[in-house]
Every structure is written in C-alpha cells, then in structure tokens.
Amino acid sequence: MTDTEIRLAPMTAEHADAVLAIFAAGIASGDSTFETRPPSWEAFDAARLPGHRFVALDADGTVTGWVACSAVSARPVYAGVVEHSLYVRPDRGGRGIGRALLEALIASTEAAGIWTIQSGIFPENTASLALHHRCGFRVIGTRERVGRHHGQWRDVILVERRSPTLV
C-alpha cells in the first residue's frame, strides 16, 4: 500500500468491530496503552468526540487504522484541548496510514477551533514518537512512573501540537 491508496472516512458504528480489534492488537503489543482490554463499542463511542475520529481504509474497505480524540476537561477554559489516540494494524505499519490519520485529525480539530492536541506515549513506542514529531508535535516532558502496567511502573512522554493559527 502506498500513501495514494489510503482512503479516510469518518468513524462510525459500522467500523466498530475492526476499530476494537485494532485497539486490541495495540493493547497486546504492550507499548501502546495502559488499557488491558478494549472497551465495549458503546463506551468507546461515548468517550470520543464524534466530529474528530477517522478510519483508514484499504482498497477493499478493510479498516487499517483509526484516530480519535476526547476532551481533556469539561471546564470551558479547556474547550480547545483534546487528547488523542492513534492505532494502525500491526501488519500495515510504515505505509503512511498513521500520518494520514493524524493529519486528518489536525485538520478537523483546527477547523473546529481546537488549539491543542495532546497524547501520552510510552518511551518504548519510538515509531509513534517519530510520527508525532514529523507531524509537528513537541515533547512537553516525561511523566515518570505515572502508572502501573502489568505490575511494572511505566513512564509516559507527554506530547502536544499547538495550532500555529489558533494560538
């Protein structure tokens, strides 16, 4: 697959099984999330902003990746700040899918007046850190031993992208 073969679409309930399967594969990798199992579709759907979630589809319509975000706070002062998650099928990495999804999220959030996109990434997830850097994210810092994952304390690198046009 090349970048030109990536088709993006808004994420809908039609994509639920594939999205959760990709999430489960990310969980199984051990370096993508503190989660230990994917949520139900209902919980996943309720926790993410509907206008800012996308799937990547290959030529036959198979979901190969997804991106979605959630508000970081209900307080009005943080209305322009979201936290995102991005997952690509393990067998489809390195083909531009993650970048296409992240660029779509950046475009949709900026169009909606969202000025900051942030995420926490395990230091071992070097591919994700590199992708985020290429898409204009910067490292804010490391949250050391912020949580336990499978009995081990884990650090998280906090990254953010501030909109150059909105701030």
Image: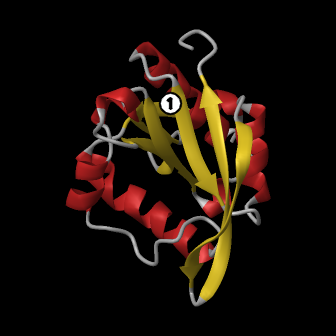
* 10 and 92: which is toward the camera: 10
Quarter holding the C terminus is top right
Label 1 Cα neighbours within 10 Å, binned few <14 / some 14-19 / many ≥20: many
Query: Which residue lies at the image location 32% right of the left edge and 29% below the top edge?
Result: 51
Residue identified by numbered label 1 = 105
Query: Which residue lies at the image location 53% right of the left edge and 42% below the top edge?
Result: 58
Image coordinates of residue 53 in percent, x first then y, are: 40, 38
Q: Is residue 76 left or right of residue 143?
A: left
Relative to 142, residue 67 above or below: above
Image coordinates of residue 42 in percent, x first then y, are: 20, 58
Residue type for callout 1: Leu
Image coordinates of residue 118 in percent, x first then y, are: 56, 41
Kindly give the residue lying farthest to the bottom in the view shown: 151
Kindly give the residue lying farthest to the top in the view shown: 165
Residue 60 in view: no
Quarter holding the N terminus is top right
Relative to 87, residue 7 above or below: above
Residue 137 in view: yes
Image coordinates of residue 30 in percent, x first then y, are: 62, 76
Name the image quarter holding residue 43: bottom left
Q: Is residue 116 left or right of residue 155?
A: left
